[in-house]
């Protein structure tokens, strides 16, 4: 991307021949339009300021310093035109470091402020709110159990974890079952799932007797990360 450097600076020539580089609100507005073209935005999310970058339909959260760095990188690359002969690249960088034109202001709000759709709000919450993401991950996995026709019972003898956790299970053949125990299920944000291959004499024993054999599949199972670990047991359930 190349652009006229004079969009961002004002050059003043003094009577003694010296040149000064300054900027005004029009220049700052042009800087923010440049940054907006790069995809940078700001908005309010859950009563706090959030910065992010739009990349087609994707949003990625950023720190404000990354916005400043993007413009500085542009200046460092000297990827601009119409620089007067008596001003060099270092003069431009000196102006930037001494004046720091990118800062919180009404202009910043005017040019970078953005409206978010409900889906975009959800996406940004997943990136910035640990508790929100945790609850989403838990609900997403439970919904997946339902989609894959898992059965549900209660571990009445605490054979997997304490406090009689719910068990989600599915037969995978030869008296073996893919079992997930929902530990700390009464906690809002400190719960999770462990996955196992458990052997029982029959399905009625699940949650009432200890398994005859127990093999760990994954502790702290997360659907997006760990689903490949159980795919081999669910081949018949997966779409062709």
Image (cartoon, rainbow, N blue to C red):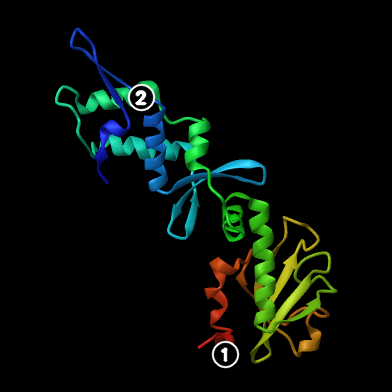
Q: Is residue 88 left or right of residue 172?
A: left
Q: Is residue 84 left or right of residue 122?
A: left
Determine the residue positioned at 78% across, 57% down.
187
Determine the residue positioned at 19% across, 7% down.
16
Q: Quadrant of residue 159?
A: bottom right
Q: Is residue 85 left or right of residue 123?
A: left
Between residue 149 and residue 185, name the one nearer to us: 149
Between residue 104 and residue 137, name the one nearer to us: 104
Please provide percent x and percent y for residue 100. 40, 26
Compared to 87, does 231 lie above or below? below
Q: What secondary structure is marked by label 1?
A: helix
Q: Mark 1 packing: few (<14 Cα in 10 Å), some, or many (20+)?
A: few
Q: What secondary structure is marked by label 2?
A: loop
Between residue 1 and residue 76, name the one nearer to us: 1
Q: Mark 2 packing: few (<14 Cα in 10 Å), some, or many (20+)?
A: some
Determine which of the numbered discs, if any, sits on residue 127 in the image.
none
Which residue in the rendered view is the most extreme toward the bottom?
Answer: 174
Please provide percent x and percent y for residue 121. 60, 55
For the residues marked 1 and 2, what is the alpha-carbon distance in whole angstroms?
66 Å
Please provide percent x and percent y for residue 153. 80, 78
Determine if residue 213 is in view: no
Please provide percent x and percent y for residue 39. 42, 49
Q: Quadrant of residue 223?
A: bottom right
Q: Nearer the viewer, mark 1 or mark 2?
A: 2
Which label's residue is closer to the chain start, 1 or 2? Answer: 2
Between residue 177 and residue 7, name the one nearer to us: 7
Determine if residue 138 is in view: yes
Residue under label 1, please give it. 236
Determine the residue positioned at 51% across, 38% down.
110
Determine which of the numbered discs, if any, sits on residue 23 in the image.
2
Determine the residue positioned at 60% across, 66% down.
222
Q: Is residue 232 left or right of residue 220?
A: left
């Amino acid at each position: 991307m190349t652009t006229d450097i004079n969009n961002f600076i004002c050059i003043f020539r003094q009577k003694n021949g010296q040149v000064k580089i300054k900027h005004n609100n029009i220049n700052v507005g042009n800087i923010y339009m440049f940054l907006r073209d790069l995809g940078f935005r700001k908005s309010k999310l859950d009563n706090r300021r959030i910065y992010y970058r739009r990349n087609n339909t994707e949003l990625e959260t950023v720190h404000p310093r990354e916005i400043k760095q993007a413009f500085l990188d542009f200046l460092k690359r000297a990827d601009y035109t119409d620089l007067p002969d008596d001003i060099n690249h270092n003069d431009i960088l000196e102006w930037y470091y001494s004046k720091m034109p990118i800062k919180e202001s009404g202009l910043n709000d005017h040019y970078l402020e953005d409206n978010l759709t409900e889906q975009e709000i959800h996406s940004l919450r997943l990136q910035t709110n640990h508790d929100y993401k945790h609850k989403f991950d838990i609900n997403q996995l439970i919904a997946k159990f339902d989609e894959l026709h898992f059965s549900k019972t209660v571990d009445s003898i605490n054979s997997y974890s304490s406090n009689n956790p719910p068990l989600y299970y599915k037969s995978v053949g030869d008296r073996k079952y893919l079992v997930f125990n929902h530990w700390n299920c009464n906690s809002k944000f400190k719960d999770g799932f462990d996955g196992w291959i458990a052997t029982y004499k029959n399905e009625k024993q699940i949650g009432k007797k200890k398994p005859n054999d127990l093999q760990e599949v994954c502790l702290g199972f997360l659907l997006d990360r760990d689903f490949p670990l159980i795919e081999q047991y669910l081949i018949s359930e997966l779409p062709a």
